[in-house]
Image (tube, rainbow, N blue to C red):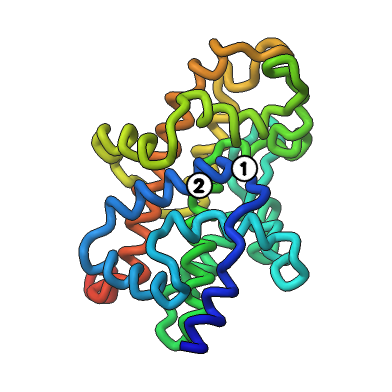
Amino acid sequence: MMRMACLALVLCAWSGAAHAWGYLGHRIIAELAESELDAETRQAVHALLAAAGKTSLADVAVWPDEVREQPEWRWTSRLHYVNFPRGDCTYDGARACPDGACVVGGIEHFLGALGDDSLGAQKRVEALSFVVHYIADAHQPLHAGWSDDKGGNLTQLRWKDEGTNLHSLWDYELIAHRGLDRAAYAALLSATPAPAVGSMRPEDWVVESCRAVDSPGFYPARRTVDVAYLEQVLPLAEARMQLAAARTAEALHRALGKSRDEASP
């Protein structure tokens, strides 16, 4: 009981500031991913969650944002994103991710920890939280945006007569635009067939995100943003969320499924 209580304390305090996709978006992606898990992987995931006193992936999806400025976890702050030179979506690990210090390295590091049966429950449930969170981050286009723009943070905009920036607009306003709560939004996205998983290489995921940033119309034509812009880019945002969920489910299957060694090529 003491061990479970201590582990629950590690993963407590779920309110507070969030970043990529915002609090709601991360939880939507996690809920959708959990719905796509096979029975074997779901059982393994729930066993880890139970050790932390949690019941769903959505419960642990935001924690990495909430601890990133704490001394113990400050080293993970750099693992939420990767930057590209403007107009060049070529992934060069030595340039973009030295020593694994980017979202690609973060995913790879914590997937390794998650699949390591020799680690204790606390380390593995922390790894589960980071995996779910970072895969979602990698699919938010502006977490693989231009270095000179700090992923849209330097693109100042006005929305509803208030100042904001492009990154914040994508994190919060896009998803809020539908006016749905987490369960309703996840149900909406799950009504569409899950996309093909495609590549399971995190470096390919961030290249996809970068190419979205580089696509025509991604940056608003005017500083004052209207509803038309949100409706224009919302299908892209939701497609990235669906793909993040599908890849999260597949990554968890590969890391936790009992037959993962047999399934590996």
x and y percentages locating residue 162 in the rendered image? 75, 20
* Apparent side of residue 68 relative to residue 52 in the rendered image (left or right): right
Label 1: state its secondary structure.
helix
Q: Position of residue 15 (x, y in %)?
A: 61, 53
Q: Quadrant of the C terminus?
A: bottom left
Q: Nearer the viewer, residue 116 or 170?
A: 170
Residue at the location (74% across, 34% down)? 153
Splitting the image into 4 quarters, where does residue 157 fall?
top right
Q: Is residue 247 placed above or below 5 in the rendered structure?
A: above
Residue underneath mark 2: 26
156 is higher (above) or lower (below) than 198? above
Position of residue 164 in the picture relative to residue 135 (left or right):
right
Quadrant position of residue 114: bottom left
Q: Residue at left 64%, top 63%? A: 100
| Label located before the other in sequence (2 or 1) | 2
Whether residue 204 is visible here, answered yes or no, is no
Query: Which residue is the site of mark 1?
Result: 143
Q: Is residue 124 left or right of residue 226?
A: left
Is 24 placed left or right of 191 in the picture? right
Residue closest to the eye, 106 or 226 = 226
Q: Residues within 10 Å of mark 1 (few under 14, many from 20)?
A: many
Q: Which numbered marker is on residue 254?
A: none
* Percent position of residue 46, x then y: 34, 69
Dividing the picture into quadrants, the one containing residue 210 is top right
Look at the image and tell me whether residue 98 can be seen: yes
Q: Which residue is depicted at the point 29% across and 51% down?
A: 35
Of badges 2 and 1, the one in the foreground is: 2
Element at label 2: helix
Q: Mark 2 is on which residue type?
A: His
Label 2, residues with CA under 10 Å away: few <14, some 14-19, many ≥20: many
Residue 56, percent across and down?
Answer: 39, 60
How many angstroms separate mark 2 from mark 1 (CA)?
A: 14 Å
